[in-house]
Amino acid sequence: MLEEMKVVKPAEMPQEKQESHLEVKRMVVHHLIKNDGEDVATLEESAACIPLEERALKLAADLNASFLRSGIEYAEFAAEKEKIFPQKILGYVKKSGDDAFVIFSREVSEKLKDDIQKIKRAKGGYLIFIEYRYYLVNYITVFMIRDTTGLLFKRDAVTENFEINAIEHLDLDKLAMACRFNPGKYELINKLYLSFIKRRMADISAYFITWVSAQNIVNNKVYTEDLNRLLNMVDCPKDENGQEIDRFTFKENIYDLVKSGPDNVVDLKEISAKYYPEAMYGENYLVDFAEKNGLDINTEFQAENTVLKHLICIDLHADGIQLRFKRSDYPARIHFDKLNPAVIIIESQALADVLKQEVNLWKPAKP
């Protein structure tokens, strides 16, 4: 049960501490060259992985942070797993190693080059493949960066490998697309092991999704269930007086916030900004918390109404008895007997009166 796990709380760690949880294993860069409106693409390939020196590690950390800030959508491979990308990445996972990583990255990049030659509006960029571990979870991620200034990478004329120029920071606008694969979750049932950054450019970036051979699984029921788990795990926020809001009230507030907007839309970034100030908790506290604790939840989704109600009520059915009540009623009016945990005490005069009336209706009439 996720509620029983030792959770990782982003608020407890400064940024440099969080970055120390990123362990880069290998990185390789290729340059896909294609201009908007053209129907010809070329690929400048690297023959080896980039040395993991300071600039490479900083780039990996910046890209990972940008990925998380962008918002995440989850997916899985389409049924046709014989397609190039899933076939090659799954084959690599079985082999591993620097040489195998370079081969995998070159083969799938060649496929992308062939694909975008058919799409006039598609543009190229630097393809950065990184295998890394983040908070003890292994990932293989491909980032596409559009570096219009040409300052991020330079190509060694002798080795024909790309090198990283010194950079102060990574401009998020340059991160055009990214996909992350979680090999561990691939082996599990009902786990979404692919994740993409959210981009509102469906007509342009659809080729990237097709290249990965992904199908987006919009499972709002699962996302809403994970929202409930998330709100059970996080630190409760503080009110304007600095007092911690009790969890029942907090969840009722979230329920009201979601229901007050159109279409039951949950926006984790909006909730984070409202209840978890960046100065105290860091940017996008709820998004980071979900990421670090393995919750597959889109940063924005449409809540499933029947599951959303679980934020404010408990609905149980066992042993032929159904019990439904507001979470705020526990333990104030509904609680366990101190001497016998098999006894549930409900303190409600109105409910007792109704029950008496019903019982009296069942009594056989006196002769």
Image: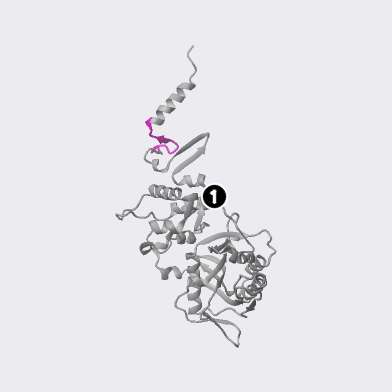
Dominant SS type (magenta): loop
Q: Is residue 344 magenta?
A: yes
Q: Position of residue 5 (x, y in %)?
A: 47, 55
Label total for image: 1
Residue 207 position (above or below residue 260): below
Q: Is residue 157 magenta?
A: no
Q: Position of residue 197 (x, y in %)?
A: 53, 64
Q: Is residue 1 visible?
A: no
Q: Neighbour class for label 1 at 10 Å: few (<14), some, many (≥20)?
A: some
Asked which quadrant contains residue 104, the reply is bottom right
Nearer to the camera, 171 or 163: 171
Q: Residue furthest front?
A: 37
User: Viewed as shown, does residue 333 lie left or right of 93?
Assistant: left
- Residue at 42%, 50% in the rendered image: 257
The residue segment tinted magenta is 336-349
- Residue at 45%, 70% in the rendered image: 19
Q: Which residue is mark 1?
A: 221
Q: Residue furthest bottom?
A: 158
Q: Check disc 1 and report its element: helix, strand or loop.
A: helix
Q: Is residue 55 visible?
A: yes
Tell me the kind of residue under disc 1: Lys
Q: Position of residue 61 (x, y in %)?
A: 48, 72
Nearer to the camera, 194 or 90: 194
User: Viewed as shown, does residue 244 lie left or right of 26?
Assistant: left
- Residue at 59%, 66% in the rendered image: 204
User: Viewed as shown, does residue 148 lie left or right of 231?
Assistant: right
Residue 245 position (above or below residue 130): above
Q: Position of residue 329 (x, y in %)?
A: 39, 40
